[in-house]
């Protein structure tokens, strides 16, 4: 079962990052139609999430650092490009780095001990949301789909705002 989950996550991330790669650097941080989250923020946020989720699954740790402050749930979306460039150097480098981080998460899921996944979440501050690592794993799947949907909504809005050519 873990292999099927890992394969689905790898497939969805590939599709999401393929969409991101088709978005020009010049517009990756724009917010058409009042959308708050740009592709730049979404991709970097997925990289942060992968880092945090990998740590929870493998070492049972969680840390809040500059990466979290820059791309976490309450971060300043308007500064996404600035933070992306400082962290990764370019839009294409950000996408490649996030793909590599996701590959590590997928491998951790593939090799996870199924019995350990049913135990209480090792990070006490997260346990209220995810009582077990299984619950966290379900969230990881939802999280990927949620932000993939936001990326698709952005592309739709960007086409209507003439930031991208029609499909």
Image (tube, rainbow, N blue to C red):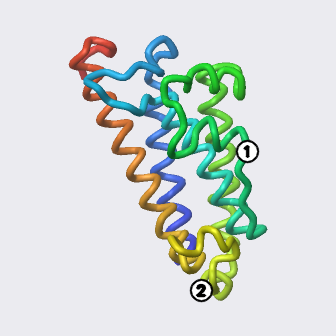
Query: Residue 136 location, x and y as percent?
Result: 54, 70
- Please give the name of the residue rendered at 57% of the width and 21% of the height, measured from the top-left corner: 81
Tally of numbered discs: 2
Secondary structure at badge 1 equals loop
Q: In this picture, is 165 found above or below 84?
A: above
Which residue in the protein does label 2 denote? Answer: 118
Q: What is the distance, in whole Å, between disc 1 and disc 2 at their CAs?
A: 28 Å
Earlier sequence position, callout 1 versus callout 2: 1
Q: Residue, x 51% and y 75% (percent of image)?
A: 135
Circles 1 and 2, Cβ within 8 Å, touching? The answer is no
Q: Position of residue 140 (x, y in %)?
A: 51, 61
Q: Report the front residue among 151 and 125.
A: 125
Check the image and report above or below for 104 versus 151. below
Task: Quickly name the residue at label 1.
Answer: 65
Q: Quadrant of the C terminus?
A: top left
The vertical placement of 133 against 43, above or below, is: below
User: Where does the image place residue 49, in percent across and percent down from the top left?
Assistant: 59, 51
Foreground residue, 163 or 83?
83
Residue at left offset 70%, top offset 20%: 89
| Residue 4 visible | no
């Amino acid at each position: 079962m873990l292999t099927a989950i890992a394969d689905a996550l790898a497939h969805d991330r590939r599709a999401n990052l393929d969409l991101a790669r088709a978005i020009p650097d010049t517009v990756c941080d724009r917010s058409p139609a009042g959308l708050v989250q740009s592709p730049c923020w979404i991709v970097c946020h997925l990289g942060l999430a992968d880092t945090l989720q990998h740590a929870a699954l493998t070492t049972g740790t969680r840390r809040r650092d500059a990466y979290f402050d820059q791309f976490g749930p309450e971060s300043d979306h308007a500064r996404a490009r600035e933070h992306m460039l400082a962290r990764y150097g370019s839009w294409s480098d950000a996408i490649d780095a996030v793909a590599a981080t996701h590959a590590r998460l997928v491998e951790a899921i593939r090799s996870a001990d199924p019995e350990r996944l049913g135990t209480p979440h090792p990070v006490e501050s997260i346990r209220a949301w995810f009582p077990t690592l299984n619950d966290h794993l379900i969230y990881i799947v939802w999280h990927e789909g949620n932000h993939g949907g936001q990326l698709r909504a952005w592309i739709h809005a960007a086409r209507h705002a003439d930031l991208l050519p029609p499909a």
